[in-house]
Image: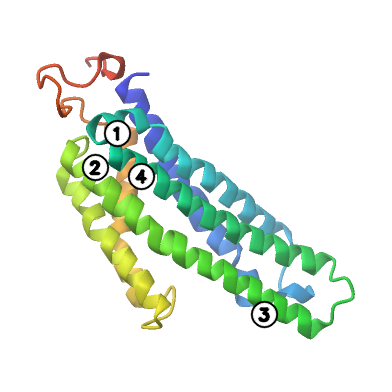
Amino acid sequence: MSLRKLARITGVLWIITFVTSIPAVLLYDPLLNNENFILGAGGGDTRIFVGATLELLLIIANIGTAVVPFALFRRYNERLAIGFVTARIVECVFIAVGIVSVLAIMTLRDDPGGTTDATLVSLGQSLVAVHDATFLLGPGFVVGVGNGLILGYLMYTSGLMPRRLALFGLIGGPLVCLSGIAVMFGAFDAGSGPQAIATIPEIIWEASLGLYLTFRGFNAAAPVPGEDRGTGIDPGLAVAAP
């Protein structure tokens, strides 16, 4: 696979993570913000199942962003490449647990099995709390470590992308982690203004990854550590001359 094709596939996968994650959160709104939703009030089932499907696609795209370019990243820093794959998998585990909690609410909503309304509402709130916790620990913390710090540092040191773009990851990663910890300790609410502001550099970083890799690609001239600087990237990943 050429380096250009590898970059395009990776970039498209990053774009898919945006296309699937943001709508999923919006589609879950009646389930997450209406405590009586589990009683059958507050909207139909379809939008929730569409949201869950989008998050399943998100999991696939998330893992793809780390696995597809792994062979290239490993040539520059094997530990960081493995760390990025690991962080993506951990993030996806949290997302999957969140999906399970949502589907559990839908199961109880369709078949309460004689459970009283008060008990159902209590169960629903507990499952929503689980979903919120997974969102806080996954997208709200692990993303800062993996996408921000690990991938940002890898791109900054390798030169595979412009260092000015990689700085957004190095800055945004710690801010995401710190804002997640602040929410956990009750400094401010999840999704509040301070947390939203703290995530802006990370959003810019991830958006730039998708767009830059899709339309520009990796820097083919980035020297591989320990190899002849004149050799460049492995011929199997070479970019055809324009």
Nearer the observer: mark 3 or 2; the answer is 2
Question: What whole-number distance in Å separates the C-alpha atoms at marks 1 and 4?
Answer: 10 Å
Identify residue for label 1. Answer: 73
Circle nearer the N terminus (4, 3): 3
Residue contact between numbered discs 1 and 4, judged by CB atoms under 8 Å: yes
How many neighbours does mark 2 have within 10 angstroms: few (below 14), some (14-19), or many (20 or more)? many
Query: Which SS class for mark 4?
Result: helix
Q: Amino acid at mark 1?
A: Phe
How many neighbours does mark 3 have within 10 angstroms: few (below 14), some (14-19), or many (20 or more)? some
Q: Which mark is residue 84?
A: 4
Q: Amino acid at mark 3?
A: Glu
Circle nearer the N terminus (1, 2): 1
Given residues 59 and 20, the one toward you in this image is 59
The correct choice, above or below, for 156 with respect to 204 in the image is above
Circle nearer the N terminus (4, 2): 4
Residue contact between numbered discs 4 and 2, judged by CB atoms under 8 Å: yes
Given residues 93 and 68, the one toward you in this image is 93
Q: Which mark is residue 35?
A: 3
Q: Residue at x 61, y 72 (%)?
A: 128
Identify residue for label 2. Answer: 154
Tell me residue 84's x, y (percent): 36, 44
Q: Amino acid at mark 4?
A: Phe
Nearer the observer: mark 4 or 3; the answer is 4
Question: What whole-number distance in Å separates the C-alpha atoms at marks 3 and 2?
Answer: 43 Å
Tell me residue 76's x, y (percent): 23, 33
Question: What whole-number distance in Å separates the C-alpha atoms at marks 1 and 2?
Answer: 8 Å
Tell me residue 234's x, y (percent): 25, 18
Residue contact between numbered discs 3 and 1, judged by CB atoms under 8 Å: no
Query: Which SS class for mark 2?
Result: helix
